[in-house]
């Protein structure tokens, strides 16, 4: 057994003890042979047998103690999405039971029993959930929450154990200790739960994810952010002032609480046709609580000049921006400013040369508005009236249709509960939209608002967000919380988000026959229809190209994820992160120093707090870094998702990631990327390499990554021996970009080697 399988000095010592015990057993067996046994040997055999039993008992206790030290606690796993996760695990167990591996003789019996027991439990849990929705569960049939919780926890432990075995990480321990122990606990729970139900429960695999149905296509056509009510008059006043007003540079602060519409009215000003024609240059920048001065300057500079040069120092960038704005009439929007430090970091780059330039600042804090103002007093946003709230609610629910007369009264009652906050209205509309023609449903939502919105004004938006989250189907909840992995102002490419959801296991194939990408796209459209995700850019074909979330929704995702141990987003507050207290499976870093500190903890911390980590993402873009801690990252053996594309390195080889053989998603940025012919990532589904100026040469082994669905390079060429009629096929490959210099006479070979490709960028040579 390899050292990778054993992993660690302690387990090596265990194997030595096992070997010693095996030697003692062989000695006893030899002495028991009829020809060799004699009276003198009898006492030796008895003594040796007793010693073997004592050694075995002692070793067993040591292994169990070690296992318990690594064992997960209930608080380490999310409480939501349990049925969807059980469904995903059952599919995985079923697939593994049909596959072949070198550990079949040990694994197959365990996997079969685990699938049987978990399938039975899933059937019962799904049956109870269905009964609850129909209101027919009797008290004595309700499964105690602690049993449900234990079931989900054990299911997570099963996945960790199986993935550890596949990754050759503590495999010995998991095969002989953790999986048998987990199976025993699951069987005990199954016996308890089955007693609570008198009905017969089928024991065949029972998948529940397919029961969720997407909203009809018409529901997924969201109204744009600019289609709002309640601010028309004030917007006209502000537009008039931005155009006329003082000749000097002026700062116009817009103040209001979260969800009150600050960004909406600012966007309305920014996109107004008169404003667009009046100003020479415009830029929109989101500040957020954890901003980076360099990135803010780069963002504004790139919008002003169209240049994406990222090589200058902060002070040089600030001066370059000031000189580019000199002599121009400019409009800059600084959205969501939390304190004056950001203003102090930026204001010297905004010259005042009497051109009537304007800076619009949105903030929740009145004090910030007062401190940044020049000539214009802060404008405090009013709350919507009940009539305006009702108008917005009906527009969001019915879109281009009229509200039916029979729903006018109840829609007015619901609007009153929204307390004049536009975001609350929009979120409530997302809940109602699913069953918009049912008066009963409108009343249910109204009553729920009464229960949820019993907090102070400032918490109304978050409370409504909780209500919206609770009303999402199980399969959409992790997809929404995943938005917290990105920075607050991120416009996330839909294709990237979909690939990440698939790699994370949030998306499952359904009986409809849709591809996973198509199913994931439906998930995205459902979240958009629920008004929790915003379309920020559409493609020429009308499809969503980029999306983002409101800052209140983003804050909710962060807080809920931290509460549920779903993920941790480290954004400039790394010093508060205590790794031994955190056991989540996903982490994202905004800045390179945070990643470096995390990596140093991975190498220094003796207790493997990182062993369960499944996803590591870097959230911000374009930062150059001298050294990415690949050595420490390669210790994260269970990683499925690794996105380091925010940081550029000079040279990188695929061989660097060879220890991470569970990777499904890999994104990197390197000047030069070497595709080592001996490297092979058996489970990789998405491979994104931003390489420039050097191309990537694709060897034969590229075609051996049979699960690959999406390959995107800065530019790449096939090795002369990399593509031929007898080479391997990439049956699952859907997207292949960008291949250059490809021989025109071999395009047919490429189409046969990659028969499922639906999108590609290939230039002929």
Image (spheres, rainbow, N blue to C red):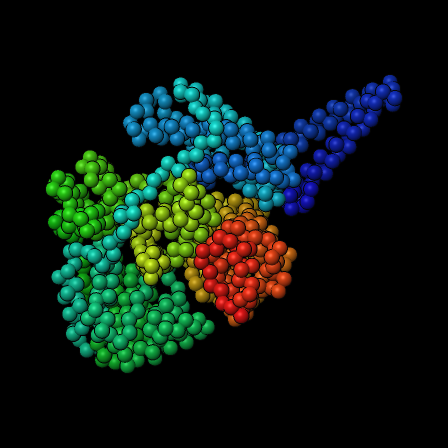
Residue 193 in the figure: left or right of residue 387: right
- Residue 339, position in %: x, y? 30, 61
The residue lying toward the viewer, choosing from 694 and 325, is 694
Quarter where residue 373 is shown: bottom left
Residue at the spot 20% in from the left edge and 35% down from the top edge: 440
- Residue 399, position in %: x, y? 20, 50
Residue at the spot 20% in from the left edge and 47% down from the top edge: 398
Is residue 757 among the parts visible in the rendering? Answer: yes
The residue lying toward the viewer, choosing from 393 and 753, is 753
Quarter where residue 508 is shown: top left
Does residue 239 lie above or below 522 as drawn? Answer: below
Residue at the spot 26% in from the left edge and 71% down from the top edge: 331
- Residue 146, position in %: x, y? 42, 29
The residue lying toward the viewer, choosing from 267 and 609, is 267
* Number of marks: 0
- Residue 434, position in %: x, y? 26, 42
Residue at the spot 42% in from the left edge and 21% down from the top edge: 200
Is residue 382 among the parts visible in the rendering? Answer: no
């Amino acid at each position: 057994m390899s050292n990778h399988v054993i992993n660690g000095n302690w387990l090596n010592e265990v194997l030595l003890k096992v070997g010693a015990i095996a030697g003692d057993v062989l000695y006893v067996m030899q002495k028991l042979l009829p020809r060799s046994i004699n009276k003198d040997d009898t006492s030796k055999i008895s003594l040796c047998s007793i010693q073997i039993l004592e050694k075995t008992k002692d070793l067993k206790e040591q292994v169990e103690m070690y296992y318990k030290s690594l064992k997960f606690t209930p608080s380490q796993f999310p409480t939501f999405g349990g049925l969807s996760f059980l469904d995903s695990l059952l599919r995985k167990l079923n697939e593994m039971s049909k596959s072949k591996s070198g550990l079949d003789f040990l694994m197959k019996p365990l996997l079969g029993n685990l699938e049987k027991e978990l399938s039975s439990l899933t059937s019962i849990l799904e049956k109870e959930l269905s009964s609850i929705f129909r209101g027919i569960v009797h008290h004595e049939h309700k499964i105690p929450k602690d049993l449900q919780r234990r079931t989900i926890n054990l299911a997570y432990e099963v996945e960790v154990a199986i993935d550890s075995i596949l990754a050759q990480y503590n495999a010995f321990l998991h095969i002989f200790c953790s999986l048998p122990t987990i199976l025993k606990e699951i069987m005990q729970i199954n016996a308890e739960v089955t007693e609570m139900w008198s009905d017969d429960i089928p024991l065949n695999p029972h998948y529940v994810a397919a029961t969720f149905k997407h909203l009809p296509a018409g529901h997924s056509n969201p109204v744009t952010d600019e289609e709002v009510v309640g601010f028309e008059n004030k917007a006209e006043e502000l537009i008039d002032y931005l155009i006329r007003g003082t000749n000097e540079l002026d700062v116009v602060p817009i103040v209001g609480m979260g969800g009150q519409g600050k960004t909406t009215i600012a966007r309305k000003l920014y996109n107004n046709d008169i404003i667009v024609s009046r100003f020479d240059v415009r830029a929109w920048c989101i500040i957020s609580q954890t901003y980076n001065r360099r990135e803010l300057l780069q963002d504004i500079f790139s919008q002003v000049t169209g240049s994406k040069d990222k090589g200058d120092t902060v002070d040089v960038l600030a001066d370059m921006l000031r000189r580019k704005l000199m002599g121009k009439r400019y409009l800059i929007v600084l959205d969501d400013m939390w304190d004056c430090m950001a203003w102090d970091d930026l204001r010297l780059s905004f010259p005042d040369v009497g051109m009537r330039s304007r800076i619009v600042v949105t903030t929740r804090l009145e004090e910030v508005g007062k401190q940044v103002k020049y000539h214009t007093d802060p404008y405090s946003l009013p709350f919507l009236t009940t009539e305006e709230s009702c108008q917005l609610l009906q527009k969001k629910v019915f879109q281009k249709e009229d509200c039916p007369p029979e729903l006018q009264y109840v829609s007015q009652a619901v609007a009153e509960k929204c307390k004049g906050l536009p975001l609350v209205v929009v979120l409530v509309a997302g809940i109602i939209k699913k069953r918009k023609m049912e008066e009963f449903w409108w009343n249910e939502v109204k009553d729920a608002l009464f229960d949820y919105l019993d907090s102070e004004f400032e918490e109304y938006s978050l409370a409504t967000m909780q209500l919206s989250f609770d009303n999402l189907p199980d399969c959409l909840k992790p997809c929404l919380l995943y938005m917290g992995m990105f920075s607050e102002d991120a416009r996330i490419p839909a294709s990237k988000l979909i690939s990440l959801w698939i790699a994370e296991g949030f998306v499952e194939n359904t009986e409809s026959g849709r591809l996973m990408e198509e199913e994931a796209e439906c998930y995205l459209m459902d979240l958009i229809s629920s008004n929790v995700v915003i379309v920020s850019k559409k493609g020429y074909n009308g499809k969503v190209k980029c999306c983002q979330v409101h800052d209140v929704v983003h804050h909710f995702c962060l807080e809920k994820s931290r509460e549920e141990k779903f993920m941790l987003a480290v954004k400039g507050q790394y010093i508060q992160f205590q790794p031994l207290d955190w056991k989540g499976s996903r982490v994202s870093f905004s800045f390179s120093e945070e990643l470096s500190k995390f990596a140093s903890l991975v190498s220094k911390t003796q207790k493997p707090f990182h062993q369960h980590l499944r996803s590591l993402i870097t959230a911000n873009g374009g930062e150059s870094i001298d050294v990415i801690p690949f050595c420490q990252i390669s210790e994260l053996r269970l990683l499925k998702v690794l996105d380091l594309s925010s940081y550029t390195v000079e040279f990188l080889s695929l061989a660097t990631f060879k220890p991470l053989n569970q990777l499904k998603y890999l994104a990197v940025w390197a000047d030069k990327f070497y595709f080592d012919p001996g490297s092979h990532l058996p489970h990789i589904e998405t491979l994104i390499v931003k390489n420039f100026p050097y191309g990537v040469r694709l060897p034969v082994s590229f075609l051996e990554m049979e699960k690959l669905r999406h390959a995107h390079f800065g530019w790449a060429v096939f090795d002369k021996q990399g593509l031929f009629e007898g080479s391997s096929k990439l049956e699952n490959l859907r997207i292949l970009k960008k291949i250059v210099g490809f021989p025109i006479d071999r395009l047919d070979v490429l189409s046969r080697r990659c028969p499922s490709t639906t999108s590609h960028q290939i230039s002929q040579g």
